[in-house]
Image (cartoon, grey):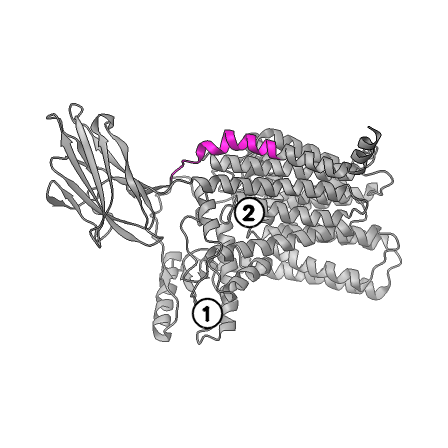
């Protein structure tokens, strides 16, 4: 018995790791059989036509041609029963219009058809389109047993040119109201779920082994955790799922196209691209992947195309009327570099999206690990902010906030290191990174410009600073202020110019630019293809509700009561939204809500991250006040910016989200650290890090279940 206990003690880490793996596997299996497997039969529904202004009784036969690139598993039509329920059978035949080959058949009983509802008819075989547009002919033949007749709905006009509808032997100008169902998700869903579950299990087991080792480096653990969880978030919420990610993707692909144009040596040289245009390659289109609402079919499409290649040349590009996110490109350098690498390797659309995300994620992971390493104290404040689900969701996306968050975390840690690290002194090696990050942060998001003043904390503590270094620091600070002023005056001048009532409208400007560009391409023989989206008719403005009249600074000063009421209504009506979106309780386009239990646990973990460990230094009272002031100033400017975008007839602040406070969250946690409360027991940092990772794994699992249930 003593030998058994001795071996158990000797190999305790391995046995605990195996037990943890077994527990994770059991929990994953329970979730699989209860919330995943029942949805294996989900089908992808594709609309062919949803208009049915007219109904005609089916006397002899109905045939309809339609075109789709999706596999056809069943057909769904709109039926109406004008009188008694018809008796008999309804047969369906599906042909390849080009060859006349019979692809599939189906026979259904008319007793099961409901009045005024879509009814699906399963086919005997799957019509495989092989990803190409194919034209099919659906033929419906009734076999009545009574005098009652069945009517079918169709639109007043054809939906697509070249498609024909024949009702009872007579050609009709219209299209049947029809949907098709593509292949079910089937086995793919199980494989995808288990891959994600095994990835999370491997993360927890590997983290336990790493934390239980003697040599434990917190910043190394943070880098690995961020990378693995970022991949897990990419699996759960692939590209186009993050807030406004479509515009960030447009900007990254435009920058990559700009680089490719310069490298490829094309005769036509790409110039500065306006914010309402974007570029990408001719192959970079996929309607399922480019859907903001993630479904299990998004997972399938994205996974199946990860090994795609393209025949597009490095200089090939497509010009689109799709908006970018910003005119400041610095924060898109990493994601654009990933996309450009895909261009050089001739990879397809999906791998280009994956590389862009991975480059952003890697940059954030490196900056976060650097922040944790350089912070002289309060390291868990940086760890907690970096491991929040909302932070990871942004980091593993094309969003500019991915790089911005990493820069703000690193800047905060370097300022603290400069001020509080033992034996630290102002030197060029420490000032240059701060100056570079400050020059990037301030123009990128002006609301976080007050964070740059945190460097003054080091200047105050390092009293022995020499004159040259002080002048250098002042010059760097003035350079940041100059960039800030110049960049904002650019917008102010642009806004003033657009306010001139004598100028032409935006639509006229766009049409003029478009025509000039088309003429230019025709004259140069360029490779661009202009893809123009249909213009939506704008609704007539309601009297007294003008979106152009917002809470400007002048309006706020003139109407303080209305501004106070706006803020109060926002807190009352949307307070839970702000609380959720700070930590990640609402993800994607805020359409995936995480259970409140995990939100509460995340806030509890953030509170524990505030607690200083035994013997650890913390901010003095004056420094805490200064740090708190800067954090509140940044948050206040973020709120003010959203207020200035809010039309005056709104009841709540437009677009305000809790994630806007993430860049200064570590600084806020350090400022709020309780003075006399310290964690009890040893290994607190390791336990807290493991708890944060475990909760993140549960959140990813929650997201997977929510997407599957859609």
User: Which label sits on residue 315?
Assistant: 1
**Local crowd at mark 1 within 10 Å, few (<14), some, or many (≥20)?**
many
| Residue 165 screen position, x and y as percent | 17, 45
Residue 121: within the magenta? no
335 with respect to 82 (left or right): right
For residue 324, above or below residue 609: below
Marks counted in the figure total 2
For residue 247, above or below residue 270: above
671 with respect to 155 (left or right): right
| Residue 60 screen position, x and y as percent | 11, 37
284 with respect to 675 (left or right): left
Boundaries of the magenta span: 25-43
Distance of mark 2 from mark 1, alpha carbons?
A: 29 Å
Q: Which residue is mark 2?
A: 234
- SS for callout 2: helix
Residue at 78% across, 65% down: 472
- The answer to which of marks 2 and 1 sits earlier in the sequence is 2
**Local crowd at mark 2 within 10 Å, few (<14), some, or many (≥20)?**
many
Magenta stretch secondary structure, dominant: helix
Residue in the foreground of this view, choosing between 639 and 233: 233
Please state which of the two labelled residues, at mark 2 or mark 1, is closer to the viewer. Answer: 2
Residue in the foreground of this view, choosing between 652 and 159: 159
- SS for callout 1: loop
């Amino acid at each position: 018995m003593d030998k058994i206990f001795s071996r158990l003690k000797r190999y305790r880490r391995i046995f605990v790791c195996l037990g943890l793996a077994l527990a994770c596997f059991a929990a994953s299996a329970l979730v699989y059989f209860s919330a995943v497997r029942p949805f294996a039969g989900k089908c992808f529904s594709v609309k062919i036509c949803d208009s049915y202004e007219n109904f005609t009784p089916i006397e002899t036969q109905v045939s309809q041609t339609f075109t789709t690139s999706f596999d056809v598993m069943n057909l769904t039509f709109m039926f109406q029963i004008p009188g008694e329920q018809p008796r008999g059978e309804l047969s369906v035949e599906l042909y390849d219009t080009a060859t006349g080959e019979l692809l599939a058949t189906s026979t259904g009983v008319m007793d099961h058809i409901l009045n005024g509802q879509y009814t699906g008819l399963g086919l005997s075989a799957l019509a495989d389109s092989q990803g190409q547009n194919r034209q099919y002919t659906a033929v419906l033949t009734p076999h009545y047993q009574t005098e009652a007749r069945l009517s079918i709905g169709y639109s007043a006009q054809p939906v697509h040119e070249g498609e024909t509808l024949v009702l009872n032997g007579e050609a009709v100008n219209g299209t049947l109201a029809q949907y098709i169902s593509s292949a079910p998700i089937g086995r793919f869903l199980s494989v995808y779920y288990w891959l994600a579950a095994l990835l999370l299990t491997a993360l927890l087991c590997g983290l336990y082994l790493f934390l239980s080792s003697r040599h434990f480096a917190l910043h190394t653990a943070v880098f690995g955790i961020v990378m693995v969880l970022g991949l897990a978030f990419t699996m759960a919420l692939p590209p186009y799922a993050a807030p406004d990610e479509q515009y960030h993707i447009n900007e990254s692909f435009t920058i990559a196209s700009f680089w490719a144009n310069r490298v490829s040596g094309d005769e036509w040289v790409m110039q500065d691209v306006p914010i309402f245009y974007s570029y990408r390659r001719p192959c970079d289109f996929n309607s399922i992947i480019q859907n903001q609402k993630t479904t299990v079919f998004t997972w399938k499409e994205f996974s199946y195309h990860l090994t795609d290649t393209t025949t597009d040349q490095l200089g090939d590009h497509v010009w689109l009327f799709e908006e970018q996110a910003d005119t400041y490109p610095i924060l898109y350098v990493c994601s654009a570099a990933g996309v450009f690498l895909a261009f050089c390797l001739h990879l397809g659309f999906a791998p280009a999206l994956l590389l862009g995300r991975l480059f952003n994620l890697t940059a954030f992971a490196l900056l976060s690990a650097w922040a944790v390493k350089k912070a002289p104290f309060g390291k868990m404040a940086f760890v907690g902010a970096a491991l929040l689900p909302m932070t990871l969701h942004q980091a593993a996306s094309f969003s500019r906030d991915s790089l911005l968050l990493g820069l703000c975390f690193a800047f905060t840690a370097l300022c603290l290191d400069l001020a509080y690290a033992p034996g630290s002194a102002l030197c060029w090696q420490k000032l240059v990174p701060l100056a570079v990050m400050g020059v990037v942060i301030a123009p990128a998001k002006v609301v976080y410009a007050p964070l740059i003043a945190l460097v003054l904390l080091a200047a105050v503590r390092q009293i022995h600073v020499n004159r040259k270094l002080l002048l250098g620091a002042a010059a760097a600070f003035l350079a940041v202020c100059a960039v800030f002023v110049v960049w904002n005056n650019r917008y102010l001048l642009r806004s003033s110019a657009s306010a001139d009532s004598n100028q032409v409208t935006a639509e006229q400007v766009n049409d003029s630019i478009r025509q000039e560009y088309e003429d230019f391409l025709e004259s140069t023989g360029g490779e661009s293809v202009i893809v123009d989206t249909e213009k939506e008719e704008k609704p007539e403005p309601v009297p007294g509700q003008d979106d152009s009249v917002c809470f400007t600074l002048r309006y706020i000063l003139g109407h303080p009561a209305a501004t106070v009421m706006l803020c109060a209504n926002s807190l009352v009506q949307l307070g839970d939204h702000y609380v959720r979106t700070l930590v990640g309780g609402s993800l994607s386009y805020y359409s995936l809500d995480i259970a409140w239990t995990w939100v509460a646990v995340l806030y509890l973990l953030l509170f524990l991250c505030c607690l200083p460990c035994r013997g650890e230094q913390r901010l003095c009272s004056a420094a805490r006040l200064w740090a708190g002031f800067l954090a509140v100033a940044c948050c206040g400017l973020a709120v003010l910016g959203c207020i200035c975008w809010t039309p005056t007839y709104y009841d709540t602040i437009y677009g305000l989200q809790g994630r806007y406070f993430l860049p200064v969250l570590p600084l806020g946690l350090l400022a709020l650290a309780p003075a006399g409360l310290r964690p009890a027991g040893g290994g607190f940092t390791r336990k807290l890090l493991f708890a944060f990772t475990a909760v993140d794994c549960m959140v990813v699992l929650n997201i997977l279940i929510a997407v599957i249930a859609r």
